[in-house]
Image (cartoon, rainbow, N blue to C red):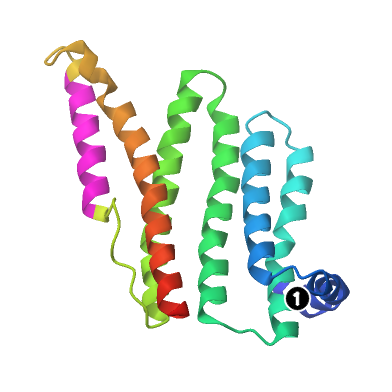
Amino acid sequence: MLEHFRAGWQKVMHPLAAALIRMHVTPDMVTWIGTVGSIAMALIFFPLGMLWQGPWLVALFIFSDSLDGNMARQLGRHSQWGSFLDSSLDRLADGALFAGLVLYYAGPGDSRLWAGFGLAALILGQVTSYVRAKAESLGLSAKMGLATRADRLLVSLLGAELTGLAAAGFLPHWLIWALPAGLIYLTIAGAVTVGQRMSAVHRQVTS
């Protein structure tokens, strides 16, 4: 729907993009700042119930999604890395937006904490697969990583099984923490895997 406004919006962004270029700001820097900013705003303001303030702050950083592309065109840079980085980080920003809204509805307390880890594990798992697919679409490779799909399935299913058996009294009660521990591991391992695959792609396009 909003694609009809893209051409006009690019004209608005052009002077700002040119000013950033004169300040020696790179498109990649804008991409990273926009992603980190939108993730932070979504995960801070939405869970706190600040639903009218949050969208404005998230949107402020999302604007960089068109700004970095405008800068790249002015600089004549249409690189594989730029395309890969922009689309991969977009997946993280999109995930954080909806994660923030889910956490708002999850309510306060321990349930929100573990829901947050579950969402983080889900989002990072999806981004892990996306990064590989995007790399392969560009003729590159990104199959490595600490947490592949098989690893994620094993840890999540085993954690759920152990926690369920412990809750039912068939295993020691301390094993009720197996699923929370698994979600924490998958969140950390997912972030590491995304970083590993992005780093591998960067090495390939700059070597």
Would residue 163 appear left or right of 202 to someone viewing this image?
A: left
Residue 55 visible in the shown view: yes
Q: Where is residue 120 in the image (x, y as percent from the top left)?
A: 45, 42
Q: In the image, is residue 61 above or below residue 80?
A: above
Image quadrant holding the C terminus, namely bottom left
Q: Residue extending furthest left?
A: 170
| Quadrant of the drawing holding the N terminus | bottom right
Position above or below: 27 against 193: below
Would residue 26 be found to the left or right of residue 192 on screen? right
**Magenta segment, principal secondary structure?**
helix
Q: How many labels does the image show?
A: 1
Q: What element carries label 1?
A: helix
In the image as oriented, which residue stretches furthest toward the bottom?
76
Residue 90, image x and y in percent?
A: 57, 61
Residue 93's x, y, as percent?
58, 53
Q: What residue type is labelled 1?
A: Arg
Residue 27 on the magenta span: no
For the point 42% across and 72% down, the residue is: 203
Report which quarter residue 19 is drawn in: bottom right
Q: Which residue is drawn at 69% across and 63% down?
A: 30
Relative vertical location of residue 149 with respect to residue 88 in this rendering, above or below:
above
- Residue at 41% x, 56% y is 194
Q: Is residue 161 magenta?
A: yes
Q: Residues within 10 Å of mark 1 (few under 14, many from 20)?
A: few
Between 180 and 169, the one nearer to me in the picture: 180
In the rendered view, would you say 127 is above or below 73? above
The residues colored magenta run 150-165
Residue that label 1 marks: 6
Q: Which of 116 and 22 is in front in this view?
A: 22
**Residue 170, picture quadrant:** top left
The quadrant in which residue 94 appears is bottom right
